[in-house]
Amino acid sequence: MTTKSIQTAFDTYQRARLAFTQSVSDMANRSVHINCILQCDALPLLHPLLKDPSIKVQQSAALAVGKLANGSLEASNEILRRRMLSTLMEDIDKRSKYYKKSSMYTLRSVAKYSEEMAQSVVNMGAIEGILLCLEDFDGGVKEAALLALGIIAKQSTNLAQACVAAGAIPMVKLCLQEPEVCMKQIAASTMGDIVKHDASLAQALCDAGCISHLVRSLSHPSTGLKVN
């Protein structure tokens, strides 16, 4: 057996892993497929692929997990039970921008179902991972992180307070000052998700100096930004 044939075998294996994750991701686009996908043990198969040696396989696996979570409460519960979010958050700052965006998508997909599930997401290091993604240079990563933060914060006063205690407001304030209108809109909406619960959270927003930036946003021609 030659060196070339050995290498070919490993290349074939990598292509097969990528093809599998891409197929699951594509099938998960339709919610009617998800029960069958879960019955075929997709999540335990996807879990180790989140740390695959191939970055492309990692990214595709993360996206597949996010789509399954978004389309199914059952899938989200299994993701929590298998502690897959802890795996997603591990070394998140060293991952590719595509992996980060898919991870943030997964966080908000799981957290959207209930306060209890959002708390479980936080218990697995979600807020810390979100704040790391808010420091990313890529605008798409920041927007995905803002959306995840907002979904968590809106679930309850305690979760909003946890976001504030972790230092989220200054990071969201920086996003509000970015030139991109879409990011400004998401940042303003996220602030609303955080402070809507009680006066102490609104005061935290004031203390961080966010109000002047929000007022300045009112002069922006974007209707969506003014609404947020």
Image: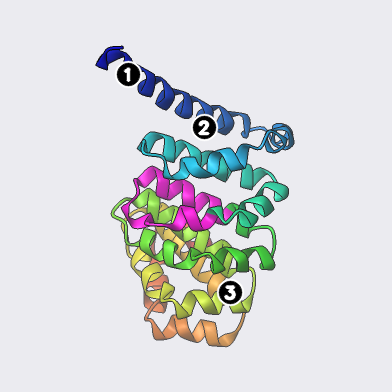
Judging by the rendered image, the residue that carries numbered circle 1 is 6
Residue at the location (54% across, 73% down)?
Answer: 194
- Of the two numbered discs 3 and 2 on the same chain, state the one appearing first in sequence: 2
Q: Is residue 88 above or below residue 226?
A: above
Question: Label 2 is placed on what type of residue?
Answer: Thr
Q: Is residue 196 above or below residue 20?
A: below
Q: Which residues are magenta?
A: 85-108
Can the viewer see residue 210 in this picture? yes
Judging by the rendered image, the residue that carries numbered circle 3 is 159
Question: Label 3 is placed on what type of residue?
Answer: Leu
Considering the numbered disc 3 on the image, is that residue within a helix, a strand or a loop? Answer: helix
Q: Position of residue 98 (x, y in %)?
A: 39, 43
Given the current orientation, which residue lies at the most extreme front position? 1
**Magenta stretch: residue 105 in it?**
yes
Can the viewer see residue 62 in this picture? no
> In this rendering, which labeled residue sits more in front, label 3 or label 1?
1
- 138 vs 5, nearest the viewer: 5
Judging by the rendered image, the residue that carries numbered circle 2 is 21
- Spatial CA distance of label 1 from label 2 is 24 Å
Considering the numbered disc 1 on the image, is that residue within a helix, a strand or a loop? Answer: helix
**Magenta stretch: residue 11 in it?**
no
- Spatial CA distance of label 3 from label 1 is 52 Å
Q: Is residue 226 above or below residue 71?
A: below
Q: Is residue 36 above or below residue 143?
A: above
Question: Label 1 is placed on what type of residue?
Answer: Ile
**Mark 3: few/some/many CA within 10 Å (<14, 14-19, 20+):** many
For residue 38, which quarter of the picture? top right
- Of the two numbered discs 3 and 1 on the same chain, state the one appearing first in sequence: 1
- Spatial CA distance of label 3 from label 2 is 33 Å
Q: Quadrant of the N terminus?
A: top left
Q: Position of residue 134 (x, y in %)?
A: 37, 61
